[in-house]
Image (spheres, rainbow, N blue to C red):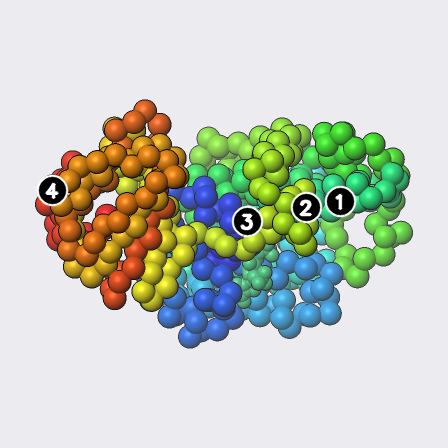
Amino acid sequence: MILVVGAEGMLGRDLMEVLPGEVRGVDLPEIDITSFESVLEVVGRYRPQVIVNAVAYTDVDGCETQAELAMQVNGEGVAILAMAAKESGAKLVQVSTDYVFDGSKGAPYLEDDPYAPLSVYGESKLAGEMNARFAPGALVVRTQWLYGLHGKNFVETMLRLGREKDELAVVNDQVGSPTWTVDLARAIRVLIERDCSGIYHAANSGFCTWNEFARTIFAEAGLSVRVNPLNTEQLGRPARRPLYSTLECGKLVQDTGFQLQPWQEALGQYLQLRREKAAQTPKVSGCGGAGISRQRRRPVERGERPWGTYTVLEENRNYKIKRIEVLPGKRLSLQKHHHRSEHWIVVSGTAKVTCGEREYMVNINESTFIPIGESHRLENPGMIPLVIIEVQSGEYLGEDDIIRFQDDFHRCVEGSAT
Ligand SMILES: NC(=O)c1ccc[n+]([C@@H]2O[C@H](COP(=O)([O-])OP(=O)(O)OC[C@H]3O[C@@H](n4cnc5c(N)ncnc54)[C@H](OP(=O)(O)O)[C@@H]3O)[C@@H](O)[C@H]2O)c1
């Protein structure tokens, strides 16, 4: 099982979608990586094989005045995770940044180029890299200029400003590679699958200035905004930033065969996805963005099974809500539970349900009830994936409360997972 720490952050949310197999996500307040007790308790509870740390104090300018907090979260927190990973035999994956370099090289940075951070944020992230290496087989993935659907970022800021103004000044003397969090999550997936360790660079290919990036965003979004040049000194931000910090990603390509797409293509896909989400999501007053819901709910757990996938959407002491997707032609085992009843609501496709002696079909927007102790089975007889929302309630909801009678995947062992 993979444990994503920082699962509610911009990268964390995409990691939860992209990483393979069983994936659990934790974030504040369930875990505080600056606390030994908290980290040991969570790692002891989930016993992951891999821990991916997507936590950071990412306010680069804020770090200048909050240096202690920056070091606690970005440096010491990683040491605590590394210790827990070492103790439990888990692999640690640490996400880091181009800000560990000073940008004076004048060419893309290699993994083993000398670091020389210019800011408190860069120093604290460098401490995190060093601390991560305390865990045997640790993997450090450096990236830069991230944007994604689930966090504050440059693309969202430009789109907002572009709707409010017809002229802007944007920095034209810092060069880097804008990177979509989904593409970064895919690179992390491949690196984990290949059991890579050490430092890797992962960023969308190609590079530009922030000014050029802004102009491309406006052009792609069909916004007519004049983008004037501005230099870093004129902007006068508290933290110093590297002027040229593109990352050479050849090692990633060589060791895994995976190459992140050009930044222009990634941006196009992101804007398209963003439009699709906006069209699907009803506008909620008070939410920012183009109608994109700002709700922070995230999957609690996700797993792959031979019949499809499940995602735990919400979990409490006496109820659990799951999204279950069954592939066409597949069925779950014939099973029963001693301590819980279940409501199944079909949200896509058609379900064939066995409940006791009865066999019947449940169509989209219909539901059915499975009483405690009744043998039951869920099947997808259709040509498209069947999606149901399962609401479990009862005094005990553990995965070991399953008795299987018949299973297409030969898992008729009492107490094994759905
Ligand atoms: N964003 C970029 O442009 C960029 C560039 C290069 C590298 N990176 C690296 O990429 C990684 C992901 O960045 P991101 O932009 O996705 O970050 P993010 O959106 O700020 O997410 C970080 C998450 O960590 C949580 N968190 C903060 N302190 C914590 C603590 N003590 N214990 C547990 N969780 C805590 C945050 O919760 P709250 O929101 O409640 O504080 C948030 O959910 C980081 O390592 C970052 O340094 C980012």
What residue did someone put label 4 on? 357
What residue did someone put label 1 on? 160
Q: Mark 1 is on which residue type?
A: Arg
First in sequence: mark 3 vs mark 4:
3
Q: Marks 1/2: CA distance? A: 7 Å
Secondary element at image label 2 = loop
Mark 4 crowd level (few <14, some 14–19, many ≥20, 10 Å Cα): few
Instruction: Establish if 212 lies above or below 318.
Output: above
| Residue nearer the viewer, 203 or 132 | 203
Q: Marks 1/3: CA distance? A: 21 Å
Mark whose residue sits in front, 1 or 4: 4
| Residue nearer the viewer, 5 or 402 | 402
| Rendered residue at 33%/66% (across/down) | 317
What residue did someone put label 3 on? 11
Q: Is residue 264 left or right of residue 380?
A: right
Mark 1 crowd level (few <14, some 14–19, many ≥20, 10 Å Cα): some
Mark 3 and ligand 1: say if the CB distance to the nearest ligand atom is below 8 Å.
yes
Residue 356 place in picture, x, y as percent:
13, 45
Quadrant of res 60: bottom right
Q: Mark 4 is on which residue type?
A: Glu
Instruction: Establish if 201 lies above or below 400.
Output: above
Residue 289 numbered tag: 2
Q: Mark 3 is on which residue type?
A: Leu
Secondary element at image label 1 = helix
Secondary element at image label 3 = helix
| Rendered residue at 79%/44% (across/down) | 161
Mark whose residue sits in front, 3 or 4: 4
